[in-house]
Amino acid sequence: MNSCELTATITVLANALSCRLTTDELNILGTVLTQLADTLFTISATRGICEE
């Protein structure tokens, strides 16, 4: 999957979720996914530092 296909897929998923979830549910999901992304970046950065 190239970057254009990936972003298009993410956009379709976001639109599908927004049609089915309440505003509160969307806010919670967005917060959870942001925390997940932050944690994954932290793990990745830590691995990079520890492996050097």
Image: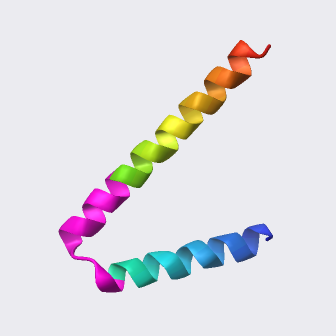
Q: Position of residue 27 (x, y in %)?
A: 27, 61
Query: Residue 30 lies in magenta, yes or no?
Result: yes
Residue at 64 percent across and 26 percent down: it is: 45
| Apparent side of residue 50 relative to residue 37 in the rendered image (left or right) | right
What is the quadrant of the N terminus in the image?
bottom right
Residue 49, compared with residue 21, is above or below; it is: above
Query: Does 40 sit left or right of 52 as displayed?
Result: left
Identify whether 33 is placed above or below 40: below
Instruction: Give the left or right position of residue 20, taking residue 16 as reference.
Output: left
- Residue 37 x, y percent position in the rendering: 51, 45
**Magenta region, mostly helix, strand or loop?**
helix
How many discs mark residues in the rendered view? 0
Instruction: Left or right? Give the position of 29 relative to 34.
Output: left
Residue stretch in magenta: 19-31
Picture coordinates of residue 12, whole percent (x, y): 53, 82
Q: Residue at the spot x=36%, y=51% of the render?
A: 32
